[in-house]
Each structure stands twice: as structure tokens, then as C-alpha cells.
Amino acid sequence: MPLRVRLTLLFALGTSLVLVAAGVLFYLLLRNDLQNSVDASLRTRFSILAAQLPEASDPATELKEAGAGPAQLLRPDGTVIASTDVAGSEPLLDRDQVAAARTGLTSLTLELERHRGTDDDEQDVRALAGPLPSAPRQTVRQQTAQQQNILVVATETDLVDAAEDRIRNIMIAATAPTVALAGLAAWLLSGAALRPVDRMRRQTAAISESDSAAELDVPATRDEIAALATTMNDLLRRLNAARARDRAFVADAGHELRTPLTNLKAELDLAGRPGRTRDDLVEAVGNAAEETDRLIRLAESLLTLARMDSGIITPRRLSVGDLLDRASRAAAGHAQTRDVTIRTDADRILTVDAEPDLLRQAVDNLLANAIRHAPPGTAVEVAAHLAEGGSAVAVQVRDHGPGFPPDFLPHAFERFRRSDSARTRDHGGTGLGLAIVAATAQAHHGTATASNHPDGGAVVTLTLPTSQPPDVGIPGPGTDESPA
């Protein structure tokens, strides 16, 4: 069911409930006021007759002159002494009511209802009955010996009942049109309120896959609809940025794959030409193997990035110092060929929750980059220490080479970014080493930064949350040198 229809039905239902509740309350209050008005009129009439009848020589005449409403003067036994023509000759009160009026009701507090038929039609009357005071000229002995008579005054309620019926009928008749008008108003108002939403829906449906700059119109109302449009535009910008990164990644990956594939095809073509010597074939096969190894490294790097982008990792607690020692020993052979020394400075007690293979690959990439750019006879420094007040472990790798170009630092961790494209490619780099480091940090809720040391050389820091309490004592640092 459309939202506009649901809003209209809910508003109409709410209006109906409010009208019914208000109508019932108004009717009950009006009925009570009318009954109070009738009772007040009866009390006034009772007071007048109670003051006049004890002195009257002819009670019947006095009753008729007091008004046209029903009234009776009854003996204590309930027989009629005097009665108005409207009241008739039969007592208005039965025996039980007479007893109640004589013993239980005094002054003006008695309210009784009695049905009296006139002209063969039943009419409702409302009555007040109470003991009639004795005449002032009677002695105390006479007042004591004589039981008090009962005065009954009544009034017909035809006009009150008619007024109540009229009000009730008017309210019932007006409910349906009022609800219909409220529903129409709700339909129009909900349509006006949802019009910007429908416009945004149409604009969103019209956005094509190739429309990277499309945004929704933001209403100037500064309400929830405008906030929704702003949020949708932010989402579209993030999606467009992610799509642009994916396209750039695919384009860069295609470019990086094309170069080794082209070289591999060229070497195979050359090897297949007639007249090639054995040495030429051996050289061609060796070059093809190098390009194949480069393709394998590139494919493995892409798979690693894809795995970390998906968030599928299985971290476990591991010692940072042990991992750095193993990585340094593994890179020592490559460092030796370039006359570079690897020095490690890491506390064994430092631990993090990380996936060992991913963290090891990130450290291997940092070591390979540092060794590649370190001048012969220098050292690559690998250190680990507590950071951020003891809540994180910082792994830092520094070389003593020329450092990063200043314009490269803001883009150091972007995929396929190289500080020296030609040199890095010649040395087998894929441009994904630092990108894997950044992805590893992000996958483990850490950070990665690149900078230049004031004394020269590049510094890359990988910071990961520690798995140990911040107040654990840390022993003094140890030094382990792995000479090349």
C-alpha cells in the first residue's frame, strides 16, 4: 500500500477517534448540565411551595396557582391531599418512595424519577420529594404529634430529551463529512509532503551507471526531506568515488599486467625465431622467467588487497618482536647482496591481534622497499615500541637513502603509486607494497604513515592496537643485528 494512502487512512482513523471521544464527552457534559438545570428548577419550585403550603387554607388551590407543573401534597401514608391537574389524582410516589421521602430525605436533597402517563402517552418526569415543614403557628406539641406531610414537585423532560436527541443526531450526522474532509486534507497534505520524495525517487531512477556527477536536488525546507536528500548525495559521492577508485585500479592493474605480458610475448617470439643460438635461448627463457615471476608477484599482491578489502581475516595474538626477527633474517640474504645491514630493536613482550601472514607480508614489503633504496654500506632500522599511551604498537622501518619526494608523500599509500616509476619497475616493484601496508593497517583497525627522517632517509610507521593492558611493564630494549 502506498505511503500516501497509509498516511491518509491513519489520519482519517485518528480524526474519527478524536471526534467520537470529543462527541461523547460533549454529549455527557451537556446532558449533565441539562439535568442540573432541571434539578435547580425543581429545587426552586419546592422551596416556594414549602414556604406557602403550611399557611394555605386550601392546598389544592395553592398548588395550582404555583405553576402548571406536576405537584402533589401527600399524607404520611402516601394518600393524596392535593394535586395539580397535570399530576392527576393518583399518588406520584409508591409506598417505598413515600417511606424514603418521609424518613430518609430532608429539605431539597431528594431526587426521584417517576413515569406518569398522560393522554395515553408515557412521559418521563423528574421529581423532588421531601417532608413539608409544619406551620409556624403550630405548637411544639402539635408538631411532634403530627407527622409531616410529603411534598412532591416534578417536571416533564420532553424538551430536555428532545434537546439531547437533537445534539446527538447532529453530532452523528456531522461525523462522516468531517472525517471525509479530514481524509481529503490528509491526502492533499501528504501528497505535498511526499512530493520531494517522489522527485528524488525519479531523479535516482534516472541516474545512469556512467553518470558520475549526478546529484539529487536538495529542498530549501531544512527538514527531514532535505536531510534525506543531503544524505543521499553524500552516499552518491562516496559510491562515485569508490567506483572511480575501482576503475583507476582496474586501469592501473591492466597497465601493470600489460608490460610483463608484452615483455614475455616478445621474449617468446624472439626465442621462436630461426637461427637462435643456445645462449640466446637460455637468455630468452631467463627473461621470460623474470617476467613470469613479476606477474606472479603482481597477482599475489592483487589477491591480498582483494582479501583485505573484503574484510575476511582471522587475527590471533602474536609477538611483534618474534615476527620482526623472522622477517629480518629472511631479508638478510637480499640485503647482503646490496651491502646493507638490518638492525632490529623490538621488545619481545609486545603483542598484537593480527593475522600473521598479512602482517608478515606488510613487514616484508617495508623491508624490501627500504633495502631497495638504501645506499650500500648503510643500515635498515626496524623498531617496535608502544605508542598512543600504551594502547598501540608502532612498527617503524627506516632507511638512510634519499627519502620520499615531497610531492609523493600525500599519495604514498595509493595503489600503483611509485616514487620513481622507472627505477622501481626495473627492480621488480609492482607499486602495491605500501598499498598492502595501508590495507593491512586498516584491516586491523590501525594506521600507516610515511615521512622523511630529519637526518635523511624514508620512514614508514605501521601502528596497530596492542593486545596487552597498557600498564604492563616493558623491559629494556634489546638489539639484534643481522649483518648482511
Image (cartoon, grey):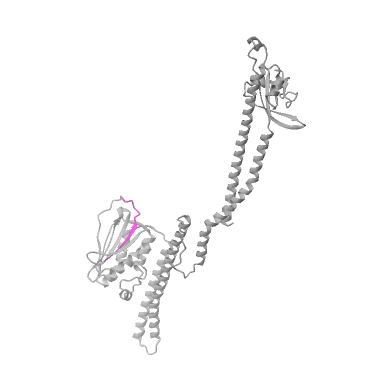
Identified at 48% across, 57% down, the residue is 225
Residue 43 place in picture, x, y as percent: 63, 25
As drawn, the residue found furthest toward the right would be: 120
Identified at 52% across, 65% down, the residue is 205
The image quadrant that residue 267 belongs to is: bottom left
281, 445: nearer the viewer: 445
| Residue 20 horizontal side relative to residue 410, left or right | right
15, 352: nearer the viewer: 15
Residue 233 is one of the magenta-drawn residues: no
Residue 285 place in picture, x, y as percent: 37, 81
352, 405: nearer the viewer: 405
Identified at 63% across, 33% down, the residue is 34
As drawn, the residue found furthest toward the front would be: 65
As drawn, the residue found furthest toward the bottom would be: 275
Residue 332 place in picture, x, y as percent: 28, 68
Reply above or below: 301 against 84: below
385, 202: nearer the viewer: 202
The residue range painted magenta reads: 458-470
The image quadrant that residue 89 belongs to is: top right
Residue 459 is one of the magenta-drawn residues: yes
In terms of secondary structure, what is the magenta stretch mainly?
Answer: strand
Residue 104 place in picture, x, y as percent: 64, 21
Reply above or below: 294 against 348: below
Tally of numbered tags: 0
Image quadrant in which the N terminus is located? bottom right
Reply above or below: 31 against 11: above
Image quadrant in which the C terminus is located? bottom left
